[in-house]
Amino acid sequence: MKFLRSISLCLLPAAAAIFAPPARAQAPAPEPAAPVGWKLVWHDEFNHGDQPDPALWNYDVGGDGWGNRELQFYTNARRENARIEDGHLIIEARREPFQGRDYTSARLVTKGKTDRTYGRFEIRAKLPLGRGTWPAIWMLPTVWDLGNKEWPDNGEIDIMEHVGYDPGVIHASTHSRKNQWRNNNQRTATLQVPDASTAFHTYALEWDAEEIRIFVDDHHFFTSRKQGDDWTSWPFYRNFYLVLNLAVGGDWGGSKGVDEKAFPRRMEVDYVRVYQKAGP
């Protein structure tokens, strides 16, 4: 009897498994709500995995100064410099010898993943403190065939720049052949965001055929308008891609020196969302 009872007890879990209802598949997370008049076409909420999704992001790699005499080496899918943590993208600059440079960091791009002409681009981020840090959220052209086929002839859109020696001041700009920082006539504006390094804020670009508008938390503080059809002042009529990076030093970020003891420092990104105008 004891033997038979033990057999029966052993069979109970198997029987329960047979008659148990099938496990329900986990429902996909709902898409974020789009602002009125816009349709979500691309996004990353950074809620999966431990590194940026290679289906959505590429890396710019190297340590040649990036045209600004920057000090970091941008690495390729190196967890110390780019990772997903608690639902955020972390881009971390570190003071360490690497490939002949004294600092490492990461520069993520959507080139070849989502290249867009016009739309609304939202990036919710918290910025690093530290003299010598230079985080940026910006856009570059996919094809470089205007003028000298180099910068700035093909354009640049800066949604957010922040230099560590001037904390809480957010810069937005556009650059072209006619209007650029080397001529000190770039189209630009600043906004005071005192808690930019302790709280998340939403940095947004709205871009159409006639103008570029930049916002912080839906506060519109910068506009760059098309003037005529001359590409030398308005190269913003074709595909651009997003760039997220954290530079160290450089002509601007390092103009007041670099606090070596400040590192590591990181930019945290909660999400990136791209919208197009909704149809009628």
Image (cartoon, rainbow, N blue to C red):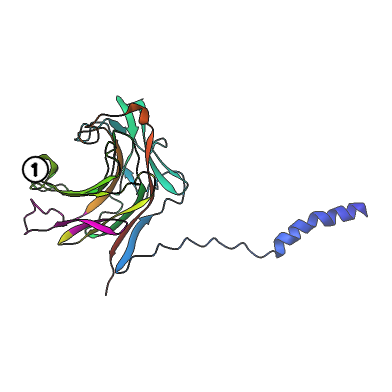
The answer to whether residue 140 is visible is no
Residue 248 lies in magenta, yes or no?
no
Residue at the far right in the pictured view: 1
- Which portion, as a residue range, is magenta? 212-239
Q: Amino acid at mark 1?
A: Asn
Residue 213 lies in magenta, yes or no?
yes
The answer to whether residue 268 is visible is yes
Residue at the far bottom in the pictured view: 280
Query: What kind of element bears circle 1?
Result: loop
Please tell me how crowded label 1 is: few (under 14), some (14-19), or many (20+) other residues with Cα within 10 Å.
Answer: few
User: Residue 170 location in percent, x, y?
Assistant: 26, 47
Q: Quadrant of the C terminus?
A: bottom left
Q: Quadrant of the N terminus?
A: bottom right
Q: Is residue 1 left or right of residue 253?
A: right
User: Residue 271 location in percent, x, y?
Assistant: 38, 53
Check the image and report above or below for 39 versus 84.
below
Q: Is residue 165 left or right of residue 229?
A: right
Residue 209 position by quadrant: bottom left
User: Residue 120 location in percent, x, y?
Assistant: 27, 60
Q: Can you identify the residue that label 1 sits on?
A: 148
Nearer the observer, 260 or 120: 260
Residue 31 position by quadrant: bottom left
Residue at left offset 27%, top offset 42% = 162
User: Residue 68 location in percent, x, y?
Assistant: 20, 34
